[in-house]
Amino acid sequence: MGTLHTALLRTWLALALAVTARLGRARDERGDVPGWVLVVVMSVGLVGVITTVAEDELTGMVRRALGSVK
């Protein structure tokens, strides 16, 4: 799961940099892109935190579910 955490962190950082760069420019009429980007960044952050905190329990749940299918 270390690779997943690294990928989530890199995605979060890239999106955070994009939002920061976007907020520094003059606003145009293309819609609320920074708002949606912020929602995506926060969602990725929440998934990363939940995965980090509950990784063992989530892994156990998946293994039990797959074991009961056999």
Image: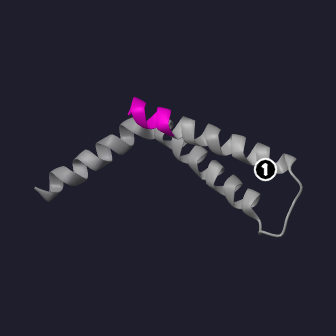
Q: Is residue 35 left or right of residue 59?
A: right
**On the image, numbered disc 1 is attached to which residue?**
22
User: Around disc 1, counting alpha carbons within 10 Å, would you say few (fewer than 14), some (14 to 19), or many (20 or more)?
Assistant: some
Q: Please tell me which residue lies in front, 44 or 25.
A: 25
Q: Position of residue 22 (x, y in %)?
A: 78, 50
Q: Position of residue 25 (x, y in %)?
A: 86, 50
Q: How is the image coloured?
A: one colour
Q: Is residue 37 above or below residue 12?
A: below
Q: Position of residue 49 (x, y in %)?
A: 55, 39
Q: Is residue 12 left or right of residue 69?
A: right
Question: Which residues are drawn in magenta?
Answer: 1-7
Q: Is residue 2 left or right of residue 62?
A: right
Report the number of discs. 1
For the point 47% across and 41% down, which residue is it? Answer: 51
| The C terminus, quarter of image | bottom left
For the point 31% across and 48% down, which residue is it? Answer: 61
Kindly state the secondary structure of the residue where label 1 is placed.
helix
| The N terminus, quarter of image | top left
Q: Is residue 68 left or right of residue 58?
A: left
For the point 23% across and 48% down, which residue is it? Answer: 64
For the point 60% across and 44% down, which residue is it? Answer: 45
Q: Is residue 5 above or below residue 21?
A: above
Say what amino acid the circle numbered 1 marks.
Answer: Arg
Q: Is residue 45 above or below residue 2?
A: below
Quadrant for residue 4, please give it.
top left
Q: Is residue 53 magenta?
A: no
* Secondary structure character of the magenta stretch overall: helix
